[in-house]
Amino acid sequence: MKRMQWVQAASAVLLAAGCVASGVVHAQDKPEVIIGYEDNGADPYMVSMAEHMFEKHMKADVQYKLFSSGPAAMSALASNSLTFMCGLGVPPLVTAISQGLPMTIVYNQERYTNAAGIVVKPESGIKGVAELKGKKIAIVAGSQASFELATFLAEAHVPYDSVTQINMAPPQMRTSWVTGAIDAAIVWDPVFSALRTAGGKAIKTDGDLPREASSYNVCIANADWAKAHPDLVQGFVAALDDGYQVTQKEQDKALGEMAKETGVTLDVAKSELAGYELFSGADQTTPKVMGLDAGVKTSATYLTLVNTGKVLKQIGRIQSVPASFEANVAPQYSKHLAH
């Protein structure tokens, strides 16, 4: 998710103790900037990569690194062997912050709407979230899905531990769905769409989550490194905005680049992209994203960090909710993109 597992993040973030603000800079003419990402399906940042927009906007030796999990990315960030990480869900970030890792959101990429949610088998008898009690649901434990499931269950007054959660990767869910090993799944595209195509019924989507406690994909950096290298961060967010602009104005071209990067058909890429509410560079400083100055603490992104922290503490994922997230939301790097 899109989403990154953070079950082991607590141990990984302890590496932050030795981190310094110097970042990933080597003895060469240009600093080395390594951008981490995960295969989350079609996304505008793939256009930024394909068209070398990061190289255009940053005076740096830009490299890319694919990660398969959140803990691996967090460990790399903590040790300063990774500069930026994109496609990260909010729960792994909150978990890292609660362990003392100085991470900050420099760009909120998008909000999930109908590209993820809870899908159930018609024969399961589940007509709504209330009927999940006593049922078996497939989930990527420790991912954004854990926060979403906890939120949906709380809304329906269903105890979190009354649902049998079966931890499995999204591809495994397809097999378990056919064999009848699960009654439901909380997952994202492309498996979310595949299960619905196989007869499943969506009873909740991420679009049902309130904006201030929602499912976002964000790009983060070490806060100390970002403060020491504001020009590089501004170039990074400008490149992301360029990818957004091409996606809006030349969607066929953008979809072709996304499909090539992810190895899917144009139709699948179009479907995946349609499941997002995308944010531009100018959007970053608005209340619906990160706000600006005094408005940061009332922005949708900030409140989502707070509310995610509360849920993670309630279900035992973190020990305590950080007193403040002001150092972890950084719209100032996008201020120059505001219209």
Image (cartoon, rainbow, N blue to C red):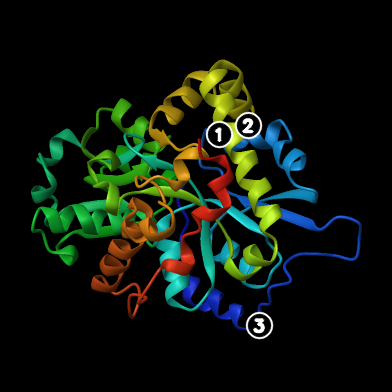
Horizontal placement of 248 versus 57: left or right?
A: left
Question: Could you tell me residue 62's position as x and y percent?
Answer: 77, 48
- Residue 155 sits in quarter: bottom left
Question: Could you tell me residue 3's position as x and y percent?
Answer: 45, 51
Question: Could you tell me residue 296's position as x and y percent?
Answer: 39, 58
Q: Determine contact: label 2, label 1, CB under 8 Å.
A: yes
Q: Determine contact: label 1, label 3, CB under 8 Å.
A: no
Q: Amino acid at mark 3?
A: Gly
Disc 2 and disc 3: Cα gap in Å? Answer: 35 Å
Relative to 295, does residue 224 appear above or below in the rendering?
below
Visible residue check, residue 207: yes
Q: Amino acid at mark 2?
A: Val
Q: Amino acid at mark 1?
A: Pro
Secondary-structure class at tag 2: helix
Query: What residue appears at the point 53 percent right and 67 percent down from the top-left corner?
Result: 103
Disc 2 and disc 1: Cα gap in Å? Answer: 5 Å
Q: What's the mark number on residue 194?
A: none
Q: Determine contact: label 2, label 3, CB under 8 Å.
A: no
Residue toward you, 121 or 223: 223
Secondary-structure class at tag 1: loop
Upstream in sequence: badge 1 or badge 3: 3
Q: What's the mark number on residue 44?
A: 1
Query: What residue appears at the point 76 percent right and 49 percent down from the top-left corner?
Result: 63
Residue that carries the numbered disc 3 in the rendered image: 18
Residue that carries the numbered disc 2 in the rendered image: 47
Q: Residues within 10 Å of mark 1 (few under 14, many from 20)?
A: many
- Residue 295 sits in quarter: bottom left
Query: What residue appears at the point 39 percent right and 54 percent down from the top-left corner?
Result: 168
Visible residue check, residue 8: no
Relative to 290, does residue 116 appear above or below in the rendering?
above
Disc 1 and disc 3: Cα gap in Å? Answer: 34 Å
